[in-house]
Structures are given as C-alpha cells and as structure tokens.
Amino acid sequence: LETCWRIKWVSLRRHAGAVYRVSDCRQITVARIEKMCQYVNSGWQEHSQTMDELTIPAGRRLRRHLFSTFRMRLVLLIFLILIPVLVLALYTASAQSALARQATEREALRLAQLTAANQEQIVNSAEQLLIALAQLSILRNGETEACNELFVALREQYDNYTNFFMVDTEGDTVCTGIPEAAPINVADRSWFARAMQTDGFSIGEFGIGAVTGKPVFTLSYPIYDDDGQVRFQLGTSLDLEHIAQFAIATHLPARTTLNAIDRNGTILYRYPDPEVWIGQPLLSQTLLDRVQSEHSGTIETTGLDGENRLYGFAPLDSSNESAFVIIGLSNQTAFAQVKSLLLQNLFGLGAVAAVTYLLIWYGTGVLGRQVNTLVASTNRLARGDLSARVDVNQLGNTRELHELGISFNEMARALELRQYELTNEIAEHERTERQLKRARDELESRVAERTADLAFLAEAGMVLASSLDYEITLSAVARLAVPKLGDWCVIDVLGENESTRQIAIVHAGGDSQRVEQLRSMNERYPVREDVLYGYQHVIQTGQMQHIEEITPAILESVCENEEQLELLRELNLCSGLCIPLKAQDRILGAITFATAESGRAYSPSDIALAEELARRAALAVDNAQLYREVRQQREHLHVTLSSIGDAVIVTDVEGRITFINTVAQSITRWQEASAIGRPLDDVFCIVNEASGQSLESPFVRVMQAGEVIGLANNTLLIARDGTRIPIDDSGAPIRGADGEVIGIVLVFRDISERRQGETRLKAALLKTRDLYEISRRISSVSSADDVLRALMASSYLEGVRQVSILAFDRPWDDQPPTSYEAVAVLHPELTFPEEAGRCSLLDHHPLAGLFSREVPTAVAAVRDQEAIAPDICAQLEEAGIGGVILFPLLAGGEWYGMLLLYYGTYNPWDHAEVRHIQGLVDQVAVAIDNIRLFAAEAEARQQAEEANQHKLRFMGMISHELRTPLASIKGFATTLLAEDVSFDDESLRQFYAIIDEEADKLTELIEQLLDLSSLQAGTLRIVPETQPVQAILDAAMAQLEMLASQHELVVEIPTELPLVLADAHRIGQVLGNLVGNAAKYSPAGTRIRITAQPFDGGVRVDVADQGPGIPREARSYIFEPFRQANSGKSAHTGAGLGLAICNGLIDSHNGRIWIDDGCTEGTTISFVLPAVSEIIDEQP
Amino acid sequence: MAATLLIVEDEDNIRTFITVNLRARGFDVIEASSAEEGLRLLQNRSPTAIILDILLPGMSGWDMLHIMSQDADLKGVPVILMTASASNVRIADIDYSNVVHSLPKPVSAGELVNVIQKALA
C-alpha cells in the first residue's frame, strides 16, 4: 500500500494533476494495491475539480482614459479644490463692486447737489449786488452813459458776470456793460416777461446769451420810479463757466463729466470740452427722462461719449428748476480698485494652480517611474522569471513603496525557493520511480519462479493428501522432488521407539542399482549419533542443515568404513540439504536432498521450497499418525458411552439398535441383549405428555433433518413395563468417513425431578402475566364497574362469587366516616341489600366491624367469625357465601373505601397469593380514586358552565324586567303628548297614575339590583345594633301589615329571647320580602305566621304561609337571583330578586336562611340571627 | 266599518296603553291577557289584525302563532309582534308569513299607531 501511495504521489507531482493509471499498478498483480489505486484516482479527480474551482483569475486590466492615471487624478483633485476659492474671489469682487457702486452713486449725487448749492450761493450774491445797484441814482435816472461805464467797470471787476444791463419796460436796452454791441430788445425773452410780472428779484431761465453767446442765465431786479411804477429792469447775466471753476476746485475724479442742461435737455455747459457740447441736445434720452421726472437722484447709463457712468443730478435753480447739473462719475474709475483687486486674486490663484500642477507633474513622474519599476518586476515574475527582483534603491524614499518592494522581493525569493524544492522533489521522485521499476521487474521474475514453486507444492500437497498411509505418500513425494530439488532424495521417519526408518530413497536418474546399494548400506550401517552431518544430526537438533559443498572430509566423518566411503564417493555428491520434518514442534523425521551429477548449488529459494515441502510432508505424516490414534480412540468410545450418565441409544442406518448403554437400559427397562437389533421404536416409545398421542419416531426425524435435533418437549417415555417417564431427549445423525449418514444416536434423560421445579416456575410466570394483564386492563377502563370486571379476570379470583367496592363519604382518618356508597358491585343479586343501595350509613354495613385500614381481613368461614352477627351469617350462607376477604382501598395515603370479595368456599391463600392479590387491589384502589376524581372534576366543570348560563339568563331577565315598566312609562308619556287625539280628564289622571306606578316599580327594581350588587360586592352597609327581635318586628310592622292587607297576619314572639346584633332596617327589609312573597303566592284570606324561637345559639324567625308551596326541585335555587319557582314568565309579577337579597342580607349578619323541607303544608322560610353572646364569643 | 284589533299582552298597563291609543283613533279593540284567552276570543271574533306579545305567562306568543298556523281561518290574519328587544327578532327570520311587523318595547304612541296603520293599509 505504501508503495502505491508513493507511486501516486510521484505521479501527481510529475504530471501536475494527471490521473494515475491503474495499469501501472497492475503489474504488481496485487489486487489490493490495484483497488487502492482506483481509490486514489477517484480521490484525485475530485481533488482536481476542487483545484479548478479554487483558481482565482488575475483580474481585468483597467481601460485607459484621461483620468486613469494617478497623476491626472491628482491634478483634477487640486483643480477641484481651487474651484471654490475662485468662486469665493469672484463673489467678494462682486460684493465689493456693489459697495463701490453705492459709494459712487452717493458721491455723484453729493457733487451734483454741491454744485447746485454753489450756484444758489452765486445767485444770492448776484441778488445782493443788483439790489445795491438799484439804489444808484444814475441807474434810477436812466443815465445811459454813466450807466454803461459803471457796467463796464463792474463786468471787468466781476468776471463771474457776463454782462450788466438795464432795459426799460418795453425791453429796449437803456445801458449795457457791453456798449459796443448793438442794442437789442429783450421783450421776447422769457426772463423779461417773468421779471415784469414780479415785483422783486427775478431769476430768468438758463439759456445761451444773445449778446454774449455764452450759456448764461439772467437775473433781474426792478427799478421803481417815484410813483412806485417799474421804470427799468436792472439785469445781469451769469455765466456758467463758474461751474467749471467749481468743478476744477473740487478736484473731480478722472473721467468725470459735468453737464448743465436746461429743461429741454440742451446742454448749457459741459465739463470737459464745453466748446464741443454747448448747445447740443443731451444724447441720452434715458438720463434726460430721469432728470425731467425726478429732478434730483442718480442713474447709471451710457454717457455722451459712449462711456458707462453713474450720474448724480440736481436742479441748478431750485426756484425754477429750469436747469439741472449732472455729474457723471466713470464706472471705470469707480470700479477700478475692485477690478484691480480681483485681478490680483485671480492672478494669485492662477499662480498657485500652475505651481501645484508643476509639482504634481514632477512628483508623480518620479512616483510613476518607481511604480513602473515594481510593475516591470512583477510582470517578469508573472512570466515565470522567478529571479526577478526590484532594486529598492530605485523606489526612492517613499516608505510604502519601499516596503512593497521588499515584500515583493521576499515573495519572489519564497517562490524561487519553492520552485527549487519542487525541482528537487521531482528529481527525487523520478529516481524513486526508476528504482521501483527495477524492483518491479525483479518481482515479476520472482513471481514466475514462485508460481512454479507453488505448482510444485500443490502437486506435492495432492500427493500427500491422496492417502493416509504416509509411507506411500512420502515415497511419492520423494519421487516428485527429484530432479526439482536435487538428484537424490532420502526420507527418514522417526519410529515409535526413537529409531529412524528410511522410507524412501530416490534417484533422479532412476538408478535402481545405486538405490539398492545405498539402502542396504544404510541398513547395515546406521548413522552414528555423534555424526555432525545428515539426517541423524538434523533429527536431533531440529535445525535444517545446508551443506554447500560435500567435501571428502565430510564424507569421511560420516562413513563407518571404506566400503561405505567408496559408495558415497561414487555417488559424486555435490551439495546437500537436510530438513527436519516438524509438526506441532514434534520432530517426525527428516528429508534429505543432495545434488550429484547436475552439480548445482542450492539457492535460497530452493531452500525455501524444500522447507515448504518438508513442512507439508511433516503435516501429512502427523495427520496419518493422528488418524491412527483416532481409530484407536474410537475403539474406546464404545466403552465410554456405556458408562455415561445420560441414556444413549445408537442405531444403524435402518433404525435398528446397535448400542444401548446401561442408563438407557434402566430407563427403558430393556436389557441390552434383547434391545440390540430391534427397531428403535420398539424400545424408545414416546408420547406427548399433554395429549397422550404417540410421537413421530425420532429416527425418522433425525434422518430427515440430517442434523442434531431436540426432540419434542413434554415427552413421556413409555418403558417396557408401561411406566411413563418424562424425558428430555435429542438426536443426532452419525456420519461415515465420507459424510454419509450411517445411523443415529439418541441421548435422553429422566427429568421427573426437574419437572417439579418447572411447575413452580410456570406458576410464577402465570402470576406475573396475571398481574401485568389485569393492571393494564384496570388502568385502561373508565368506570368502576369496568374496573371490577377487569379485576375479576384474574385467575386467582376464580372462586369469587361476588365483589363490591364501597367508597366512604370522606377519608377515614382519626374519625370514621358516617356513610358509604357502593360505587361498583359485580353480581349484585347475591350481595347484601345494604350494598345495592347507592348510599347508606356506615354503621348499617353488616361487615363494618371488620373494616381495617392496615391489612386485608380474610374470613375463612363466616360462621366462625364473631364480628358477624348470626343473622348476617345465615343471610350469607343462604346466598352461598362461605368466606369473605376485605381489602382496604387507599390512594394518596387516604383510606377512602373497601373492596369486598365474597367466596363460596374460601381456600386460604398462601403468602405469595395474598401479596399478588394485594398488588391487584392496589391498582384497583388507584383506578377507582382516579375515576372519582375525574367525576368530581367533570361535575365542577358542569357547575361552572351552568353558572355561566345562569349569568346570561340573569342579564336577559334584568333587561326584560327593566324594559316592562319603561314600556308603560314611555307609552303613556307619548300618549299624553299626542296631538292628534284628546282624552277626558279621568283618562288623563289614569295615565299619570300608571306612569307613577311604573316609575315606582322601576325604582324598586333598581334599588333591588343595587342592593344585590352591593351584597355580591360586599359593599352593602349594615349598621347592626344590639336589640331584641321584637323591636325589629315592631319597626317593620306597619309595612308588613300593608303587604299582608289581604291576609291574616299573625305574629308570635316569645318574651324570653336572646338579644341579637342586627340592622333593624335590613332585617325589616328581609321580613318585608318574605311577607310580600307569602302574600303574593298564597290565596287571599289565608294566614301568614311570623314566629321566633331560640335556635342553635341564636334566634330563628319563621315566616309561614298557607299557599301551594314551592316545588321540590326549585328549593335548591330559590335563593339565587331571578329564580322564581315557576321559571320563565311568572303569573306573579316581581323580578325574583327578593329572596336572593334576603339571602345576602342574612349572610351579612352571619346568619343563615333556608326553606322548609317540603313536608308541611304551605311554604316556610326560616332565618337565624346569631345572639349577641355568640358574636362576642367569636370576636375576642 | 272600523278595523278590529285583538291585543294579547299580559302587562295590564301596556295593554291599556295600546287600547286607549287605538280606540282614540277609531279602532275597535278586544283585549286578552294571555295567549289562551286570545285563542278563545278568536273562536267567536274575527279581528282585522292581532298585536301579540311574545313573552306571555303559560303559552307563549310563538305557541299561539303555531296554533294559528294550523287553522285555515286564522293563519292569514296579520300579526304584529311585540318584543322586548326589536333587534332580537327579524321579520325575515320568522317562519310565519302572517307576521307583518314587529313593535319594540318601549314604543311611543305615535310609532304604535303608525305601525298599525301601515300594517292595515
């Protein structure tokens, strides 16, 4: 097996899972190994499948895409991080720009308003100037010349003022600061018309001056003559240039525009480049609309030069609002700072992104090269190059990568090592396999050799088995052994007297002359005992002797004389082998082989074969000798059989007796002389013990069966003199040497004594069966009668005439029970009448005096039993009862009844029988107890069900009783309410009366129900007082008399009564109920009696009427709620709660209420109230 | 001719209530305080309809219905049942086809008259 395992192992290693071929094993021709290989194959197949399942795929290569590399993912990550920063920067810029915008708007408006305020101030100072000038006489007198001079001087002095002039009321110029210009008429000017209408200072509208050609507005002040009439209008034109001066003075931000426009949008002045724009219309309609509508405010729009600006505007002259100043602040300027900040931020972000990207690009480039180094090495390993290693120095100083590289190298090293081991192992296994093949070839040749040997041995075995005469067989073997085992073969056998006898001398060449010479010489010169070679020595030592070369020295030491030496020399012996014939450690002789002419030497296999042959020959000799001994022993058998203890009869094949020993002679009463030669059936005559019929001849049965048989049991042998003897017998065929039956032998013995023991055994067996059977039946039945029937099936109770089971009303402990019940009686016609009844007083049982708890009481003869009265004896004897046994019935330690067995004639039992019967009775006791418990349980269950039913009925009754008065009340109430009909007064009164009456009924019923429920809940309040019964009656009398108004009420209370502790109101209620019932159920005019008397430590009160009485079956439930005697709908009204309440009330007083036994006329209900002393006694 | 109604009801006050109401509305009423009395009255009188209480002393309303169903003359007389609980009795479940209506207890005068008029219509 080990070889096979090794082969399998090699094969598995070699072919890496190839299934080993069975044929490789077959050459070894060992069936078990072959089988083993099959197991291995099937095992390997299963294993290979498992291996396939376990192979884990290397995995799929990832698809290449832009972000599949580590580097790009890192870049992506950084950009993702930068996005929120960018968003934040943009958001901040937007917020800042909103703030800047607000500030700019405020600034624009402020500047506009400042400009307007400045203008206002200029106007004010102009007004002051004009008022002052108006006072000059030259003006007032209209002296043109002087005036002109003054105006020219003023104009030169105040460059703010474009011109000074004075016009008459017709609008013609009187004098002017620019006298060189042609005089004009200003009557068509708007300011003139306005000035003429105004009595004081007036401000004209902005416009382009007619004389100056500049954007001006005109201010005027009237000059009055002495009459108070306007004579001239003194005026001045104010140039808007000063606004530019103001703008320059306030240092407007770069790219700021300042526009002054009139109401129609014509540009009056613009800074910068006023010369280009003055007189042009304002291009932005949006701006104009806004200015015209709001006058003051801000707006963002595109300016005249196409640039986006934030404009603030305000009216230049608040009185007319004919011109507006618009300050436009450039968006570019306003947001310049914000934009510059944003740009800085964005630039910073871009720089960070660029630097990060470069760092990642460089960093991942390095990492990628390191990883690629690892991947390349791994791929080499995967391609099978186990020498692949990673240069860890190339992996940089990243710790994880470094460790990964080291781990990889260790893995590769381990793999390489494993491969090296595997290679070595495979080489080793190849070597082993080669060795095995050599061994196998060798084995094959040896097997062939061995097969020839075995064939030889088989032939020798056959020869040896062919006869029991070993001299013949050994000679044949010797002939067979040459030339197989030599040229000579000699067999010597040890005789009985320790001398050797030469059985055979054989020569391969069949040289009979030589053989004869040798034989005669051996006879003449027996081998000496001190010779160290040859059979004599081997027989002595028991050891095989192999003489590889028979030298002359050996021959000389063996031989006695020259002649012998000469003969042996002539034989030309070469090599010799002498083997002892040994069987069971006994030396039987020796077999000697020698080679001569063939000159061959003995190989180990030759020696083994020779030894095997010797062993078999020895066995044959041994067997033959044993056989001889056996034959001698058979001679002795006859003698032995004659003296054996059992009876023996031997027959021949025809059934005639050939041998009968003395025991058989004495049992059969046949003498040997007369028996021999007779047919067996004459001498051995047997019958069945039970039937008396003769049995089939044992001879025939043995011959048919052909083997040992036990003959029939219960056999009686009929002896020659007719005596019947119980025997046990058996027979067996006798077989001849060739296996055929040559006769039978019968062995038998007298078993009379043993039979007696058997009878006792059978009785015990019967008893056990009885106990088992009866117990089983008792426990399986469910009624007491069946239990008794089962008990009576016992064979031990055959003489019982009748049997009764009595159960006491309560267990008999210290106190005897008062009555008993016959729960089961078998054959009741024979028993006492006292047992036939269902229930009797214990004292009435005729055998009560014999009841005992401890042991069964046996009355052998009733006549002799003193405890049995003579008349009972007579009664028993008349019924054929002679004896009785009384068993106590106990269950759970309680003595609850008796089992009575009545006998016709009682044969006293022995101790064992009593014990046996007691066992059965114990079973009966338990069974009867179980049946009673079961019955009690069933009864309790039925009562519970009845109580439930009763409760349902109770609810139904309450519902009905409540509904009936309600029906009347509702009926009449609705009748009274009816509008379609009318009733007379009499009827109406009747209806009201009925409603009242029914309401009373309802009230009473509800009160009763409440009382009842309080009683049942135990919450009804009782206020007991110590008082005489008379007092209670006196209190209730008026009510009672009213209730019994149709009857004769008689009250008889003796004076000498104990005081009672009672609630007078509640007891009055009880009396009222009882009297009310009496009155209700008895005919009018009859008597109702209330009597009282001392009773059982209290006072008993009876209320008796002369009515029909309460039916007997109703008495048990009359005190239950809604249980009127004639159940269902009564002819009498009333809910049936009265007596239930009475019962509850009396109970609460610790009293008792009951109804008469029905023997007297009418109905009497009685109750007892405990006397005061009684209560006091109880309570301490 | 006015319709005649037989009332079989053991409670005097309830019977009175039915009687006065029906008489006040022009019906002829004959009264019986038990089923036995009702059957006796039916031997001589042929009422248009019967108002019958179920729970009666002695013979019950059901007994009376059964006896009426055996009589060819009586089994067609319409019957209005009086029951303590109307929900306990469904007209559809009653084997007697002449039972046309049931009256619960308690019942108002108006309802009573309504049911009787409907039953006689």
Image (cartoon, grey):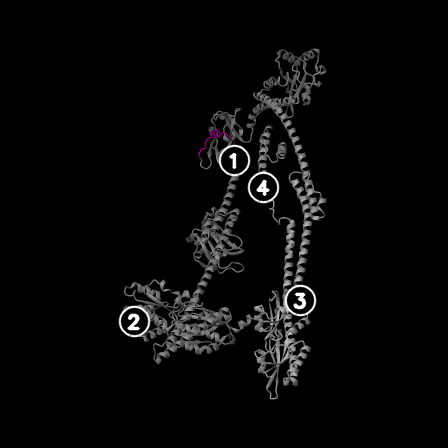
Gap between marks 2 and 1, in whole Å?
111 Å
**Percent from the top left, x then y, of residue A136?**
66, 85
Question: Which amino acid type is marked by label 4?
Answer: Glu
- Choose mark 2 or mark 1, whichever is in front: 2
Disc 1 to disc 3: CB gap under 8 Å = no
Numbered-mark total: 4
| Occupied quadrant, residue A384 | top right
Gap between marks 1 and 3, in whole Å?
156 Å
Residues rendered magenta in the picture? A693-707
Q: Which mark is residue A53?
A: 4
Q: Which residue is drawn at the image coordinates 53% and 60% (left, top)?
A: A815
Residue holding disc 1 = A751
The chain under label 4 reads A
Gap between marks 3 and 4, in whole Å?
86 Å
Disc 3 to disc 4: CB gap under 8 Å = no
Question: Which amino acid type is marked by label 2?
Answer: Thr
Query: Of marks 3 and 4, which one's residue comes earlier in the chain?
Result: 4
Confirm whether the magenta stretch covers residue A706: yes
**Percent from the top left, x then y, of residue A680?**
48, 28
- In the displayed structure, does residue A1103 sit left or right of residue A250? left
Q: Nearer the viewer, residue A1051 or A611?
A: A611
Tag 4: Cα neighbours inside 10 Å, few (<14), some, or many (≥20)?
few
The chain under label 2 reads B
Residue holding disc 3 = A254
Are the residues under badges 2 and 4 in a single subunit? no
| Occupied quadrant, residue A584 | top right
Disc 2 to disc 4: CB gap under 8 Å = no
Are the residues under badges 2 and 3 in a single subunit? no
Element under disc 4: helix
